[in-house]
Amino acid sequence: MIQELKIKNVLSFKNEVTFSFLASNDKFAEDSQVVKISENARLLRFGVLYGYNASGKSNLLYAFDFLPRFWSYKPEGMDEPTGVIPFKLDASTPSEPSCFELVFFVGNVKYWYQLELDRNQVYLEKLSYYKSVQPTMLFERKLVDGQSVVEINPKGDKISASAKELINGYCLKNLSFFVARNQVNASLPLIDAAKNWMKEQTMPAVFPTTYLTDYAQRKTAENNDLTRYLVSFLHEADFNITNISSDIVYRPISDEEVKFRTSDESIPKDERERIKKEKTIPLLHTSFEHTVENENGQEAYQMSRGDESTGTLRTFGIETILYEALVNNAFLPIDEIETSQHPKLLEKMLYEYLKTHSRSQLLVTTHNDGLLDLVDDLIRKDSVWFTEKDKAGVTDLYKLSDFRGVNRLSSIREAYRNKRFGATMK
């Protein structure tokens, strides 16, 4: 689980800001929305971010999304960019390092990851863990005379001199330590626990343009429990959908496409041989059973995904990724979660997610201020955050629970509309 992320000089975040999942002393929804890892670490499962257009909401999700991508990003050469985007509305910041600090838990073990880099190279990358109050460094890599130098602390993971030398050799200045580590056969259990957590328990950010239907089809084809969950949710949400079936169908392809696909080494060898022999490719076909009541009583009709509305397919996709986050105890960021969703349907989505006990975490951005009417009914005050951009184009980040007198407000939604918290149109 994530405790906090600090960033500086990342997109519109010129100055250091911190987003934290640490819970306040508020006891509302303690049982389902707060995970107590230790006396000093009570972590929230949900965060919602408000702010007017172009205020930096999506940029925060980019920052969360950058780290897992960077940990696995393997550039083709030393001249490839790192992928980080600094604050550009200033003469000096584009040439200064961008900074990230992530505090997270793997099980009950606390980790602290630090990263400083620009578009060309990594200046500092460090991973520590806590076996006591003070952090113990696991590895640290610095840039020395244009070369990355990696140190691995034997008080954490022990490693042979030859394996350490190999990691140093693979650790190019524009990639993560973890990419270099993946190329070396060595036992690094503490470091690998963090690496595996990032790979398996952080999900890619979902944006309004993210097409989720293919992903949802694959998952429902693999998982009957997911299919039953989706059918139940959609039925309760009045979609009159009573079944979903995803099957593999084989489409014939041309000789030219056969040649192209059989030369693609990313496709498993046995599948390439099948394509060459059968000249077909597998496609997923999903049908939705709709049950209606008319003068003939109840009747069921099958409809393809092409017959379904954008809203239905978006719900199909969003509910699939929410389910995956829940069962995998994963972190999931969603930008503009209200996209193609009725306000009441969005409330149901969040209710179903938040009532389910899990170590998953959901961070969403939204323009739906109606959710603010659900503070202390469905949503905790310390889960609500705001972004606001100043005249210099710099985004500030702050939370609702930092404001005095919030408990005395009759309507947090009206207070937000009346600019009590900023983060809205001037």
Image: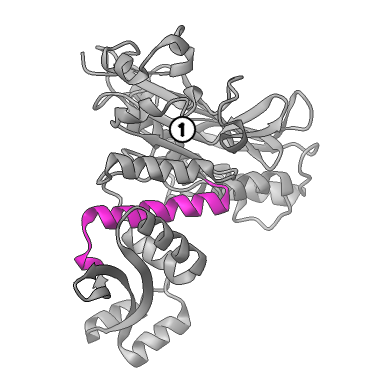
- Quarter assignment of residue 286: bottom left
Question: Can the viewer see residue 97?
Answer: no
**Most frequent secondary structure within the magenta stretch:** helix
On whether residue 400 falls in the magenta region, the answer is no
- The x and y percentages for residue 168 are 62, 44
Q: Is residue 74 above or below residue 256?
A: above
Q: Residue at x 30, y 62 (%)?
A: 240
Q: Residue at x 79, y 39 (%)?
A: 154
- The x and y percentages for residue 410 are 38, 14
Left or right of 56 in this view: 63: right
Q: Residue at x 25, y 68 (%)?
A: 293
On whether residue 322 falls in the magenta region, the answer is yes
Type of amino acid at the residue the image marks with label 1 = Leu
Quarter of the image containing the C terminus? Answer: top left
Q: Residue at x 21, y 58 (%)?
A: 309
Q: Is residue 69 above or below residue 374?
A: below
Q: Is residue 332 above or below residue 254?
A: above
